[in-house]
Amino acid sequence: MKKANQSYLEATNSYYKGVTEYKNNPQSANAVNRAKEFTGNISTKQVYDELVKSIPIEKRFNFSEEDLKRLNPVGYQFIKDLENGVTGDE
């Protein structure tokens, strides 16, 4: 919103227009890749850290990616998709 000096509504409409454009033509200059947009605002490490906080504290000692995969497969896949630039629209 602040990047393009847009209102919330204008930014939301612009974002979803870009997402739709990505589905139709990923090479378009107006296309928005959800994963890239998301990771432009928050790092995958921050996402990982937040997911780990949702794990019971007694299971967090020496917590690994494999533990996350076992205990929270959806969260694990979300991080992997972000890392690989997958948008969820494929």
Image (cartoon, grey):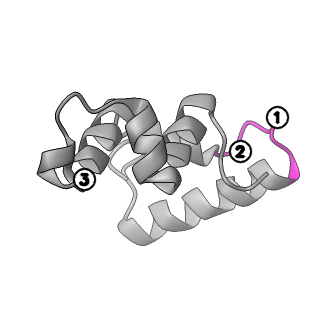
Label 2, on which residue? 31
Q: Nearer the viewer, residue 75 or 81?
A: 75
- Relative to 8, does residue 37 appear above or below in the rendering? above
Residue at disc 1, secondary structure: loop
Residue drawn at (62%, 30%), measured in percent from left and top?
Answer: 84
Residue 17, image x, y percentages:
67, 61
Q: Which mark is residue 55?
A: 3
Instruction: State the extent of the magenta-drawn residues as a range.
Output: 24-32
Magenta segment includes 26: yes
Q: Quadrant of residue 59?
A: top left
Mark 1–mark 3 Cα distance, whole angstroms, equals: 39 Å
- Relative to 5, does residue 17 appear above or below in the rendering? below
Magenta segment includes 83: no
Residue 20 is left or right of residue 51, and the answer is right
Residue 12 is left or right of residue 5, and the answer is right
- Relative to 68, does residue 73 appear above or below in the rendering? below
Which mark is first along the chain, 3 or 2?
2
The amino acid type, in three-letter code, at marker 1 is Gln
Residue 22, image x, y percentages:
76, 48
